[in-house]
């Protein structure tokens, strides 16, 4: 990925500004002495099974990517797993979700799969993830309607969910139609390229687009799409399991469905630009939701911060290990 320095600076400062705003929303009015008490009295052994179940979810992600890539090349899940962890690491320390492109680059290096085709499968993953996240939210909408509307984002979740559903489901339908009718899609794309793209760029864009469309082959049957959806649901249920285990380290209890809702909301919020590591965009909606469910603000803050670190540190460390084992360097450009 080649970006101008001005574009990178713009992305960095925008993300930093959004993170600062979200951190302010998350931490205003919080008694930090009580947060400290919640942190020092937490039973951190509960993080161990939480981290373990999270890595199972990452392995399932690697299997899902293997499944999506399979029409292009059969790559065993065990070889996908390190690449997926590198992608997590990239998303956690670089801005603008650069880890998605990074793992496409590493896959090309190892398996010769074109970056554009890999990116198509990665976008498909993200669309299915978004649909599952919204399903988690919609399962809890009746209960959500009765919550305290003063709890930050909570009062607007229903409206935001409807807009999010329209966006993700609309994108999913477009990709499914493009996969099921490849010849029609190719003709439409070629017409658009010929009419809208300057002559000197047409062939490069046409080549990129054709390779991109080849990455959608795994969605050409309803059975294949259903398999990807079910796998996505399993991934996010396992991740919610981590939320559940970490909850037991603190002195509060909410239902598994509430944690599914929290998982859905915070992960939808992290699609916004932010500082690397989703600072603020993860924390603010998580704290707001738990507070709306009656969890004291200090405990909700301590739990959300520990959960964020437990989600960030282990996978980033493992991804960094595989990254350095690849012989890559931190200053390398992603191209």
Image: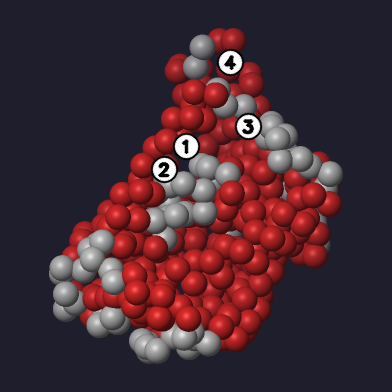
Q: Residue at x 64, y 54 (%)?
A: 89
Q: Earlier in the sequence, mark 4 or mark 2?
A: 2
Q: Earlier in the sequence, mark 4 or mark 1?
A: 1
Query: What mark, if any, has residue 12 been given in the picture?
Result: 1
Name above or below for residue 260 compared with residue 111: below
Q: Earlier in the sequence, mark 1 or mark 3?
A: 3
Name above or below for residue 221 compared with residue 47: above
Q: Residue 278 appears at what percent x and percent y?
A: 47, 54
Q: Which residue is mark 4?
A: 201
Q: Is residue 8 left or right of residue 54?
A: left
Q: Colour scheme used in the picture?
A: secondary structure
**Taking the image as drawn, is residue 78 in sight?**
yes
Q: Residues within 10 Å of mark 4 (few under 14, many from 20)?
A: few
Q: Residue at x 48, y 81 (%)?
A: 40
Q: Which residue is mark 3?
A: 1
Q: Secondary structure at mark 4?
A: helix
Give the spatial CA distance, label 1 vs label 3. 16 Å
Residue closer to the observer: 237 or 179: 237
Q: Secondary structure at mark 3?
A: loop
Q: In front of the other: label 4 or label 1?
A: 1
The N terminus - image quarter? top right
Q: Are marks 4 and 2 in contact (CB under 8 Å)?
A: no
Q: Residue 190 appears at what percent x and percent y?
A: 54, 25
Give the spatial CA distance, label 4 vs label 3. 17 Å
Q: Which residue is mark 2?
A: 16
Q: Residue 14 appears at what percent x and percent y?
A: 39, 37
Q: Residue 235 appears at what percent x and percent y?
A: 57, 71
Give the spatial CA distance, label 3 vs label 2. 21 Å
Q: Are marks 2 and 1 in contact (CB under 8 Å)?
A: yes
Residue closer to the observer: 16 or 4: 16
């Amino acid at each position: 990925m080649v970006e101008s320095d001005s574009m990178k600076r713009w992305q960095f400062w925008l993300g930093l500004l959004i993170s600062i705003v979200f951190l302010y929303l998350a931490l205003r009015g919080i008694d930090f002495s009580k947060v400290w008490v919640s942190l020092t009295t937490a039973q951190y052994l509960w993080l161990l099974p939480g981290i373990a179940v999270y890595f199972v979810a990452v392995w399932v992600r690697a299997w899902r990517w293997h499944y999506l890539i399979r029409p292009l090349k059969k790559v065993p899940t065990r070889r996908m797993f390190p690449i997926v962890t590198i992608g997590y690491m990239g998303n956690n320390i670089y801005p603008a979700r650069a880890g998605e492109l990074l793992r496409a680059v590493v896959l090309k290096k190892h398996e010769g799969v074109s970056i554009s085709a890999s990116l198509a499968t990665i976008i498909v993953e993200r669309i299915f993830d978004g649909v599952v996240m919204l399903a988690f939210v919609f399962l809890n909408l009746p209960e959500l309607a009765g919550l305290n509307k003063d709890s930050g984002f909570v009062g607007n979740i229903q409206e935001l969910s409807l807009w999010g559903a329209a966006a993700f489901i609309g994108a999913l339908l477009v990709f499914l139609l493009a996969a099921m009718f490849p010849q029609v899609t190719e003709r439409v794309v070629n017409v658009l390229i010929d009419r809208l793209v300057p002559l000197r760029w047409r062939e490069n864009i046409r080549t990129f687009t054709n390779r991109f469309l080849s990455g959608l082959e795994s969605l050409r049957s309803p059975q294949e799409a259903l398999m990807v959806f079910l796998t996505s649901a399993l991934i996010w249920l396992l991740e919610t399991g981590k939320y559940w285990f970490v909850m037991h380290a603190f002195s509060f209890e909410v239902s598994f469905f509430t944690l599914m809702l929290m998982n859905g909301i915070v992960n939808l919020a992290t699609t916004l630009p932010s500082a690397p590591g989703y600072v603020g965009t993860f924390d603010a909606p998580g704290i707001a939701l738990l507070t709306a469910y009656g969890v004291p603000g200090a405990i909700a803050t301590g739990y959300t911060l520990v959960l964020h670190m437990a989600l960030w540190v282990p996978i980033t460390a493992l991804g960094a290990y595989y990254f350095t084992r690849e012989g890559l360097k931190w200053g390398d450009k992603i191209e």
